[in-house]
Amino acid sequence: MQIDGKAPYDSQNVFARILRGEVPCNKVFENEWVMAFHDIAPKAPVHVLIIPRQAYVSFMDFHTKASPDEIVGVMRSVGEVARHMGLEKNGYRLITNAGPDSGQEVPHFHIHLLGGKPLPLFPV
Ligand code: 5GP
């Protein structure tokens, strides 16, 4: 399915259901801005998904609608999760897919945090 990163928010998407506690997840971190949990199909030794608590379809939706306080809160939280996962010494990669060309699968804005080994160069 192709995700339109600007479509109306679907409150039944799986990350919305994880936020509501309707679907289990392996949580690693949470604060007032975000929840972070292990990806169900990890692509690296550490593969964590960081999602805002509020409803945004994609990064396009987030950067246009979120308040400055929320943007700062979410971005600072991403750094906190990376530190919490012990990735600051050797580094990590952040990825967010937004819209059809990116291959975004879940229509709730999320940032992939990948690390734990030297990662292959970008495929594109
Ligand atoms: P996207 O392609 O949208 O950027 O990435 C979605 C990610 O969510 C994928 O890496 C996929 O493995 C992960 N994912 C999909 N469904 C679930 C789920 O129910 N639980 C968890 N923890 N991850 C999921």
Image: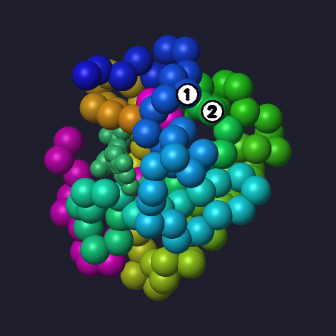
Tell me residue 88's x, y (percent): 50, 79
Boundaries of the magenta span: 107-124
Q: Percent position (x, y) of residue 103?
A: 28, 32
Residue type highlighted by circle 1: Ser
Find the distance from the CA under tag 1 to the CA under tag 2: 8 Å
Residue 92 sits above or below residue 32 on the image: below
Do the CB atoms of the residues marked 1 and 2 lie less than 8 Å apart?
Answer: yes
Above-or-below relation of 63 to 42: above
In this rendering, which labeled residue sits more in front, label 1 or label 2?
1
Residue pictured at 82% horizontal, 45% vertical: 69
Say whether residue 115 is left or right of residue 53.
left
The reply to whether residue 82 is in sight is no
Give the residue at mark 2.
55
Instruction: Count residues near mark 1 (Cα–Cα under 10 Å), then give few for <14, some for 14-19, many for 20+.
Output: some
Q: Main secondary structure of the magenta part?
A: loop
Instruction: State which quarter of the image contains the C terminus.
Output: top left
Residue 113 against residue 17 in the figure, above or below: below
Question: Which residue occupies 34% across, 33% down?
Answer: 104
The residue type indicated by label 2 comes to Ala
Numbered disc total: 2
Query: Which of the labelled discs sits on residue 36, or is there none?
Result: none
Q: Position of residue 115 (x, y in %)?
A: 35, 71
* Residue receiving disc 1: 11
